[in-house]
Image (cartoon, grey):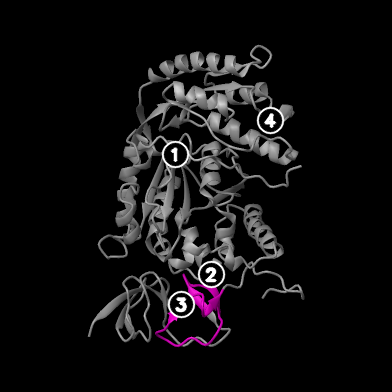
């Protein structure tokens, strides 16, 4: 089976960055900075430079990259799926709603 | 390690040897067209109708650019300058630049009221200053004399994995050697400001870093638009970046891990060597001018390239008086814009080089460029108009 590469920047992260174009169904070898390698199966296409979920992330759950929170899941994200603007949103600098709170 | 540079009367060392004519506009442009080795800026920010705070920023930018170690001599004239506000009077600017000990020629408004005569006089003076400057020889200078600055742009996930960390390795080296280094981009620290604040030299500087992020975030919240439609910019999103926090967390790696000595205003010259955060705006027409006005003699544009389009002819001469080294870790950007990009660090992603090895290789390129080798974009004459980073509404 073809396997592709992705990089996990911090051992705390729940996403990895694809450094090759990954096709649905392919195995992904995860190279962890200062950690041990492991692998995961992609359940959808993840293009070069895009992120793949390493674990199931519930709706509202933290998306972690560089060891830090980079946003929240808009919907539940399955391990092996593409993580991008369709299912994750930032928590910072969001427009104020009428209630004066962030979105 | 060392490079070959131009020693200035104030002890600073330049990587280039230009004559600068200010302020920007028709007169200065004509002098530049006539005489080789002369630079100016093209900007709509004359100061007219601007608040005192913004006029001071314009003055600081012009004075700072004149004091830059890459500038051998300066010509100041009074045409189109500042509509008579005291901060922008040519005599004031000339006096402040002259503190550096370099030749400053004032073409006084009292004597030369006619723009045509100023052009004529300016050309004559510029020819003399350029010939004088050409007598200077490059001499050996250690790396502590370098003053570097970085912007990351078109950021994508390759920026955070390799492009910025390789840059950061080199920034740490320069700071360790006693050099001067600048980074900034207010919006792109939101979500990562706590990591920067931990590196502040003292509590006050840490508080200032948090304050820059807070004030920027407040403005974003109040602008009435969703930040996700502004920043990350569409090119970032096309390159795989999903949120502003993700962009910021990748972006801060470009300045390494050294202690942050202070938070500077746009175009503010620091009193000491070390690493500084600059309160500025990320756009390329603004940020490089601010860095060179603060004293940077060599600058970097660390390009992501996500959603890289057809503009493979990357902007030359953004820093006006300092070269820009374009770098990328994105193989697609590099292949598309090889004629403009000086350095490729995607080797780190490919597993062919470590961050340290790529950082050392970048250092070698820097020494060549600092010693006079043109960067790829520096071979072009074109210069973008510049935009001074102003805060207030015009009146």
What distance separates the C-alpha of mark 2 from that of mark 4?
41 Å
Q: What chain is tagged by disc 3?
A: A
Residue B6 image point, x, y percent: 40, 27
- Asked if labels 1 and 4 touch by Cβ distance under 8 angstroms, the answer is no
Q: Of discs 2 and 4, which sits in the foreground? A: 4
The location of residue B283, given as percent across then percent down, is 54, 50
Q: Quadrant of residue B104?
A: top right
Density class for disc 4 (Cα within 10 Å; few <14, some 14-19, many ≥20) is many
At horizontal 29% and vertical 56% (from top left) the residue drawn is B335
Labels 4, 3: front one: 4
Q: Nearer the viewer, residue A24 or B74?
A: A24
Q: Is residue A84 magenta?
A: yes
Q: Which residue is mark 4?
A: B82
Number of numbered discs? 4
Q: Point out the frontmost of discs 1 and 2.
A: 1
Residue that label 2 marks? B243
Residue bounds of the magenta highlight = A63-89
């Amino acid at each position: 089976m073809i396997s592709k590469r992705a990089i996990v920047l911090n051992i705390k992260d729940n996403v990895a960055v694809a450094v090759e174009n990954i096709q649905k169904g392919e195995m992904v070898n995860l190279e962890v900075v200062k950690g041990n390698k492991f692998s995961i199966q992609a359940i959808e296409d993840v293009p070069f430079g895009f992120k793949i979920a390493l674990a199931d992330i519930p709706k509202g759950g933290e998306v972690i990259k560089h060891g830090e929170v980079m946003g929240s899941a808009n919907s539940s994200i399955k391990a092996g799926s593409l993580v991008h603007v369709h299912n994750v949103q930032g928590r910072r600098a969001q427009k104020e709603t009428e209630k004066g709170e962030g979105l | 390690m060392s490079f070959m540079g131009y020693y200035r009367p104030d002890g600073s060392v330049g990587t280039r040897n230009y004559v600068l004519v200010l302020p920007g506009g028709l007169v200065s442009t004509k002098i530049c067209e006539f005489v080789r080795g002369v630079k100016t800026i093209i900007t709509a920010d004359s100061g007219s109708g601007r608040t005192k705070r913004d006029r001071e920023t314009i003055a600081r930018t012009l004075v700072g650019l004149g004091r830059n170690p890459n500038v051998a001599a300066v010509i100041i004239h009074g045409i189109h300058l500042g509509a008579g506000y005291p901060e922008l009077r040519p005599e004031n600017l000339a006096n402040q630049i002259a503190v550096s000990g370099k030749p400053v020629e004032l073409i006084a408004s009292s004597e030369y009221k006619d723009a045509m005569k100023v052009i004529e006089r300016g050309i004559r003076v510029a020819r003399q200053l350029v010939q004088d400057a050409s007598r200077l020889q490059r001499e050996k200078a250690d790396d502590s004399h370098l003053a570097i600055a970085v912007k990351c742009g078109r950021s994508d996930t390759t920026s955070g994995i390799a492009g910025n960390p390789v840059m950061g390795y080199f920034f740490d080296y320069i700071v360790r050697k006693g050099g001067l280094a600048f980074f900034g981009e207010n919006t792109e620290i939101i979500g990562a400001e706590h990591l920067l604040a931990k590196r502040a030299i003292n509590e006050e500087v840490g508080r200032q870093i948090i304050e820059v992020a807070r004030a920027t975030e407040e403005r974003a919240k109040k602008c009435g638009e969703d930040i996700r439609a502004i920043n990350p910019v569409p090119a970032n999103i096309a390159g795989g970046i999903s949120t502003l926090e993700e962009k910021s967390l990748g972006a801060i790696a470009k300045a390494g891990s050294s202690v942050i000595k202070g938070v500077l205003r746009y175009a503010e010259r620091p009193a000491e060597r070390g690493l500084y955060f600059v309160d500025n705006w990320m756009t390329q027409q603004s940020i490089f001018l601010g860095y060179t006005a603060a004293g940077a003699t060599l600058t970097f544009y660390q390009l992501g390239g996500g959603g890289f389009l057809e503009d493979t002819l990357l902007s030359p001469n953004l820093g006006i008086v300092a070269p820009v080294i374009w770098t990328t870790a994105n193989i697609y950007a590099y292949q598309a814009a090889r004629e403009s990009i000086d350095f490729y660090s995607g080797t780190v992603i490919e597993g062919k080089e470590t961050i340290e090895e790529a950082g050392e290789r970048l250092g070698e390129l820097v020494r060549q460029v600092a010693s006079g080798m043109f960067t790829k974009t520096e071979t072009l004459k074109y210069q973008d108009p510049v935009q001074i980073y102003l805060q207030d509404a015009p009146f």
